[in-house]
DNA sequence: TGAATTAGTTAATTAGACTAACAAATGAAA
DNA sequence: TTTCATTTGTTAGTCTAATTAACTAATTCA
């Protein structure tokens, strides 16, 4: 607990005005006064200050039934760009958004270059330059990198697919882009994305299933990243005591049974299609082929255990699942929720991600804007 | 996020002063000014206000090397009493403390009366009256009841041992005691107790093993009770898919393998001592009898899995274990931490409760004082 | 045209923290 | 004993931010 003083009040209330505008713009001063419960006069002062900083602008006048028409205010979104990159092991996805969170064009997807530790940063710099050339030229509000691995205080501690640990990405990028650069675990970003886009609120858990399984934990509207940034490593919850060995050194981690990689391995084994891709597996699932169906049964069973364990410990209001499987097979989530071992209490929704592949990007943009506006909690207009 | 105004500043800063005094009293105005970084003048104002409310008092003058001697201030602890009761299934334990958290005599332990739903509240009222007669006569700052079951917003939702759900304890007690009454889950109270007594800080998990297994989750110095107060139900994490049936309706809950009840059942079976008490089991453990040792091996193995799962999800800085087993067998915790499946990262301490049976009471007192002083986070002098 | 209504501004008030200056108390040095 | 530096704590006045009250401005409707 720190001391409070007047300047903090003003900073807090300015953030409150920005937050309100971001979610509900355009709004008049009078509307802002009613929604924030700050006095009209205070709002006028804050508004003129924010206008002087070019953070908000007047955008014409609105309608009224009777009485003077309101002057509408909105976020001055076009002055800067926020960037996010999802650095997946196989491909890099580049996102750009304006300061109100609205997208600036579709994401750019490129295959990740062949891994070489020393070449990683230069390749990223180059790709970024190419991406920036496609965008309107604006100063940057910030860049967020989604890392498939463990990150703490902008340092990469561990990556499972290739060795990025302790590679300094933030420093050099910060210098060349002249903007703050943030690193964050990909599953945690997904959770922030769900939070920002209002998919789930306050207390929820966002589970990402790719090659591995990770999660982001939101409690009281805040991401809980744990003491050392390792929270949400649910792929390594033990589902089968003494089960399959895991590269983490343990046995029976759920990741060895319910990740995309585990499912694909099992599908290849059962079907005999040793070279099958995950897309082929998905097709087989859609076609209800026996080998694929068997894999899905296993997936449902282990996800049910995983969800039970996660919900028993944290009691979330909702669980958001980010998985290509859930997208392709709309029947999957109800099956998991109905599985006998998945005792999710009533009212705890299990829902699919609604922006699908782009949660990570949305989360990155969310993080950049949150920092840019100095706001603790942010909701963005959909 | 709410609007901020001056009155909130003052409330916040008064809390800050109280917090500082509770942890480090006695302190002079000058010391308070330095520690809180509030101006001397502000401190003087706040102090005179708090003295007018009789919350703090001057307690003589301190030493100085040169210059005027400081007037020491301390919490006016003797004006009220804070009460806590641990309503265990088998016995009730009554705690009383002064407003600085210091104990007012030893706890009173009495066997719980034979369960009868209608007689529960009258019996409790009677026992409380008897307890109060032993204490100095003071107005009460509050009473906290530790419930072995699920509680949300002062309502009992579920109790495993006898049917207290929806029994209104808080309302009648509040009327007869003329003070606020709080209900809280016992494991959550343990966590608050550990927090208040400084055993662990900010991010930790406190595990209580009795007949069942529960936990309290502290993140960023706050108890996370989940969306409906059900967080920390780690006894029902599934340790063995398709394992032993549990009254909760699921199979293979860790509670069926590592709770006191489960251990005792297994010990009775293995040793043939069908009527053995838990104390006899503990003695057998100390004596290293084979049947007991076998039970302990199982306990260590399942605790290792449980701790791995909990730590992977929440990444705490420490895990505090409240268990009679750990108290009696100092070797047990190192064994758990060293078990192959308990991959607690380095630096994540596994430690026994240091105030043992009284964590629940300490947590109850903590909660009452926290509410009484209107402080978010409280540390008490040991 | 004027009454009612809503938006937004101006001037004065209030609350709270801060600065500067000072009084009070005390140990150490002259 | 006196003086001086040092520390504690108070008093008077200033600054910032939010609020109230009273106003002007703009618009609809009768």
Image: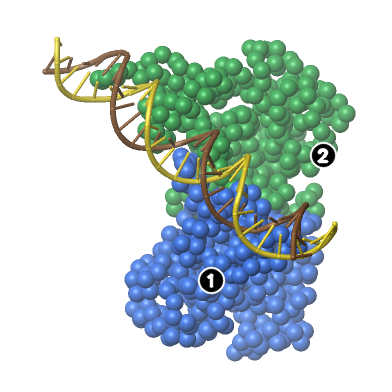
Chain colours: A green, B blue, C yellow, D brown
Task: Name the spot of residue B259 as percent of width and height, x first.
Answer: 62, 73
Please give the name of the residue rendered at 44% of the width and 31% of the height, measured from the top-left corner: A42
Measured Cα–Cα span from mark 1 to mark 2? 52 Å
Q: Is residue B13 left or right of residue A25?
A: right
Left or right for C17, reference A150? left
Q: Which residue is mark 1?
A: B77
Q: Secondary structure at mark 2?
A: loop
- Which image quadrant for residue A285? top right
Quadrant including the C terminus of chain B: bottom right
Specify the subunit that label 1 lies on: B
Which mark is in front, 1 or 2? 1
Residue pictured at 55% horizontal, 64% vertical: B188
Q: Which mark is residue B39?
A: none
Q: Residues within 10 Å of mark 1 (few under 14, many from 20)?
A: some
In the image, A292 versus A130, the foreground residue is A130
In the depicted structure, whether residue B301 falls above or below residue A257: below
Q: Would residue A23 be seen by someone viewing this image from the given angle?
A: no
B347 w.r.t. B187: above or below: above
Confirm whether circles 1 and 2 share one chain. Answer: no
Q: List x then y, in percent, for residue A71.
A: 39, 18
Residue A68 appears left or right of B222:
left
The residue beneath circle 2 is: A165
Image height of A196 relative to D29, above or below: below
Across and down, in percent, residue A54 comes to 55, 19
* Total labels drawn: 2
> x, y (%) of residue A100?
54, 24
Q: Chain of mark 2?
A: A
Q: Residue at x 54, y 67 (%)?
A: B57
User: Which element is circle 1 on?
Assistant: helix
Q: Quick one: B72 or B185, which is closer to the camera?
A: B72
In the displayed structure image, the side of residue A63 where residue B132 appears, left or right? right
């Amino acid at each position: 607990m720190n001391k409070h003083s007047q300047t903090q009040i003003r900073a807090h209330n300015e953030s409150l005005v920005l937050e309100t505008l971001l979610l509900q713009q355009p709004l008049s001063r009078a509307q802002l006064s009613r929604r924030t419960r700050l006095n009209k006069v205070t709002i006028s002062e804050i508004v003129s200050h924010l206008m002087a900083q070019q953070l908000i602008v007047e955008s014409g006048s609105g309608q009224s039934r009777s009485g003077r028409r309101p002057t509408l205010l909105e976020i001055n979104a076009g002055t800067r760009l926020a960037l996010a990159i999802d650095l997946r092991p196989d491909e890099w996805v580049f996102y750009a958004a304006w300061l109100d969170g609205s997208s600036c064009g579709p994401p750019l997807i490129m295959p990740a270059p062949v891994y070489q530790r020393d070449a990683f940063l230069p390749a990223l710099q180059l790709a970024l330059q190419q991406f920036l050339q496609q965008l309107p030229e604006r100063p940057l509000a910030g860049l967020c990198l989604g890392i498939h691995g463990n990150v703490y205080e902008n340092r990469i501690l561990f990556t499972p697919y290739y060795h990025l640990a302790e590679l300094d990405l933030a420093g050099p990028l910060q210098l060349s882009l002249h903007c703050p650069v943030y690193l964050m675990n990909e599953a945690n970003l997904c959770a922030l994305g769900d939070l920002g886009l209002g998919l789930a609120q306050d207390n929820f858990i966002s589970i990402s299933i790719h090659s591995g399984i990770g999660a982001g934990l939101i409690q009281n509207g805040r991401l809980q990243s744990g003491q050392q940034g390792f929270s949400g490593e649910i792929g390594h919850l033990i589902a089968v005591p003494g089960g399959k060995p895991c590269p983490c050194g343990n046995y029976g981690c759920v990741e060895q049974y319910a990740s995309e990689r585990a499912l694909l391995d099992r599908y290849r084994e059962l079907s005999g299609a040793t070279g099958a891709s995950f897309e082929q597996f998905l097709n087989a699932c859609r076609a209800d082929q026996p080998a694929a169906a068997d894999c899905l049964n296993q997936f449902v069973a282990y996800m049910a255990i995983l969800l039970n364990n996660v919900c028993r410990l944290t009691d979330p209001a909702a669980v958001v699942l980010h998985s290509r499987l859930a997208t392709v097979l709309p029947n999957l989530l109800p099956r998991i929720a109905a599985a006998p071992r998945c005792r999710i209490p009533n009212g705890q929704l299990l829902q699919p991600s609604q922006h699908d592949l782009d949660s990570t990007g949305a989360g990155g943009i969310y993080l950049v804007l949150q920092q840019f506006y100095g706001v603790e909690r942010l909701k963005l207009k959909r």
